Image (cartoon, grey):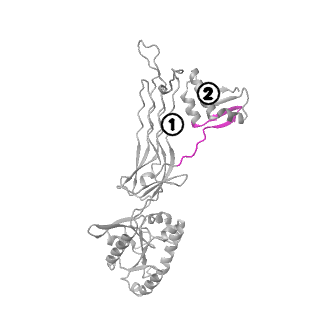
Amino acid sequence: MFIDNARIRLKAGNGGNGKVSFHREKYVSAGGPDGGDGGRGGDILILADEGMRTLADFKYMRKYEAQSGEDGQGGNCSGKNGNDLLIRVPLGTLVIHGETGRILADMLEPGQTEVIARGGQGGKGNQHFATPTRQAPEFAKPGKPGEELVVELELKSLADVGLIGFPNVGKSTILSMISAAKPKIANYHFTTLEPKIGVVRVEEGKSFLAADIPGLIEGAHQGTGLGHEFLRHIERTRLLLHVVDVSGSEGRDPVSDVEVILRELREYSPLLAEKPQIIVANKMDLPDGQAYYPLFEEEMIRKGYEVVPVSAATGQGLNKLVYLASQKLDTLPAASSMAEIPVMAEEVPEKPYTIRKENGTFIVEGRRIQNLVYSVNMDSYTSMQYFQRVVRKMGLIDALVQQGVREGDRVKLYDVEFEYTS
């Protein structure tokens, strides 16, 4: 099964929590704080794998989660870091942020590895919060959450040359004749439902990759006949071999066929229509092809295209086509990455908390609030002092006042509930 796009959810590992602990030893009555730090959460990385051809693996597994870091322990022992998660994709895969549409990575080189989601930092243990005036801190920092995002994986074939044209014009046969590729060939439409890539050897030490792009039809730029799925595989090619049935054996006009395909390329992406093209007039072994070719060639030259007459059935003109394509490629720039810079997903500023009123109680929620509540010991006076300082620094008290909180109202922060006093 050929699958060239997938949508998956990634969750990097959370950082482990810091530990609240004090040194306990025989004959030591008041040991100092020795809570260790939490381990770092694992990253999620994407690896370009030469051995993969499709994104079929992602059809059945849609969520990937890296290992979280372990919590810190007493005795100044830090928690173990979480293991990174490596996800393998085929060469030519774009990694796109599912919400912003930004290209995060373009996997062009074998073995290329990119970090897509970073694990959270581990929290600090209470050993870090001891001061001359606070020698027994009863709180520690929680670990930070790992990055979480949805990404689109989109496979665009990596080939120097793309064979394009209507269905059943001979693209697959031509590829099988000029390379070692063995695409499925039959005399009916849409035999090819996935791109096939072959190595075309020009001479000793010189070759290029050619892809048989499934047949395009009118309306392909709107998705008709799997148009978008087919067109995306042309985007990386440097040269297009536009194959036309010059004999008109399907009952279509060859000149009109060329115009239709060019229009579809322009509508999908103006950059595609600007790619260099060689018009390949196929089926020259047929009498109608020989009869119509002079008029067809004249019209194509008038439009500024170079034309090569060939017969995929007999091999006529294919050597000339290969050498001409190679010469053209020598003058064209190498394919470049479609990503501006492989970067991390753009961070969307997260609200530190939300406030709502329910049954007369002000309920405060949010990841930062939750982490704070779980990091303090509410039975400890010093820990409560720390909690109050952080809450005020967050601006939560002012926010509650703006929401209409009054003396004596109940305020709930997850497991902590208290009566508001000004």
Q: Where is residue 263 in the image (x, y as percent from the top left)?
A: 52, 73
Answer whether residue 352 is magenta in the image.
Answer: yes
On screen, residue 73 versus residue 320, left or right, reads right
Please determine whether, in this image, residue 64 is positioned above or below residue 235.
above
For residue 374, the mark is: none
Residue nearest the viewer, comparing 214 with 46: 46
Residue type at the position of mark 1? Lys
Residue that label 2 marks? 388
Please determine whether, in this image, residue 339 is positioned above or below residue 44.
below
Q: Which residue is drawn at 65% across and 26% down?
A: 418
Disc 2 packing (10 Å; few <14; some 14–19; many ≥20): few
Residue type at the position of mark 2? Gln
Q: Give the range drawn in magenta.
A: 346-367
Dot 1: element: loop
Question: Is disc 2 in contact with disc 1, using a CB cutoff of under 8 Å?
Answer: no
Q: Outermost residue, top direction?
A: 27
Image quadrant in which the N terminus is located: bottom left
Residue that label 1 marks? 144
Q: Where is residue 76 in the image (x, y as percent from the top left)?
A: 42, 26
Please determine whether, in this image, residue 61 is positioned above or below residue 243.
above
Q: For the residues marked 2 and 1, what is the alpha-carbon distance in whole angstroms?
A: 21 Å
**For residue 167, which quarter of the picture?**
bottom left
Residue nearest the viewer, comparing 315 with 25: 25
Q: Which residue is drawn at 53% across and 26% down?
A: 139
Evaluate whether residue 253 shows in this view: no
Dot 2: element: helix
> Which mark's residue is nearer the viewer, 2 or 1?
2
